[in-house]
Amino acid sequence: VLACTACRHLPWRRELLEEWAEVAQAQGMRAFVQGNLRWLVGMRSLRRVWPAFTLLAPIAFNVPVGGFVAQIRAILSMDDSLRAELCDIAVPTLVIVGSQDTLTPMGDSHELASLIPNAELAVVSGAAHTFMVERAGTFNRTVLGFLDGARPASESPDVADLDDDLDAATA
């Protein structure tokens, strides 16, 4: 499952990510989140669920700066030539994107899905880069549905067996 991703560095995104790393290092995560929320959360979602975001904001503020900056550095260090290897992927692949994602827009996901043989593309309507939170139910149903369809029926867990395993673990 590939979510919120791209297979090449575009100059504007590289510049933006470098700026994010600088802001986080110099001013902390609070300044980063406050200055860049529009890149991460769809405006409709932000207006609709603002009270929930005020509860979740402290979590984002407490992300370790070093980990966040390391993530950005890892993204920026990826060589664009690796995209030529996407055609060698031989496993079922779901590419999923929010329709309002401005950081990794739908065009990036379309390109990625077109380069991976038999990849499936799913678009979460009305959601942005944090669609896993904005539309958690839709995201979970989409991923679970894909995973259920990607494995042979003989390997699919039986819900009753999972319930039995849970009961045994909590006994």
Image (cartoon, helix red, strand yellow):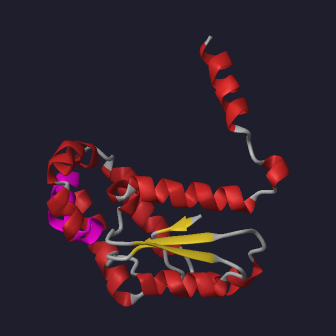
Tell which of 45 and 30 is nearer to you.
Answer: 45
Query: How many numbered discs sit on the rendered protein?
Result: 0
Please give the name of the residue rendered at 69% of the width and 24% of the height, measured from the top-left corner: 164
Residue occupying image coordinates x 39% and y 81%: 105
User: Residue 154 appears at what percent x and percent y?
Assistant: 85, 49
- Magenta span main SS: helix
Q: Residue 18 versus residue 136: which sits nearer the camera?
A: 136
**Residue span colored magenta:** 27-42
Of all residues, the one furthest to the right in this rendering is 154
**Please, is residue 3 above or below residue 14 in the view?**
above
Q: Point out residue 68 in the picture as x, y percentages from the top left corner.
A: 37, 56
Q: In the displayed image of the protein, which residue is found farthest to the top?
A: 171
Look at the image and tell me whether residue 37 can be seen: yes
Question: x, y (%) of residue 171?
Answer: 62, 10
Residue sitting at 26 percent across and 65 percent down? Answer: 41
Residue 112's place in the image compared with 22, above or below, is below
Task: Specify whether residue 49 is painted magenta.
Answer: no
Specify the quadrant of the image occupied by residue 150. bottom right
Q: In this view, does 66 lie above or below 128?
A: above
Q: Can residue 81 be seen in this view?
A: no
- Taking the magenta stretch, the answer to whether it contains residue 31 is yes
Would you say 141 lies left or right of 85 here?
left
Which quarter shows the N terminus? bottom right
Residue 117 position in % (x across, y down): 72, 82
Q: Which residue is drawn at 65% across and 28% down?
A: 163
Q: Is residue 161 left or right of residue 132?
A: right
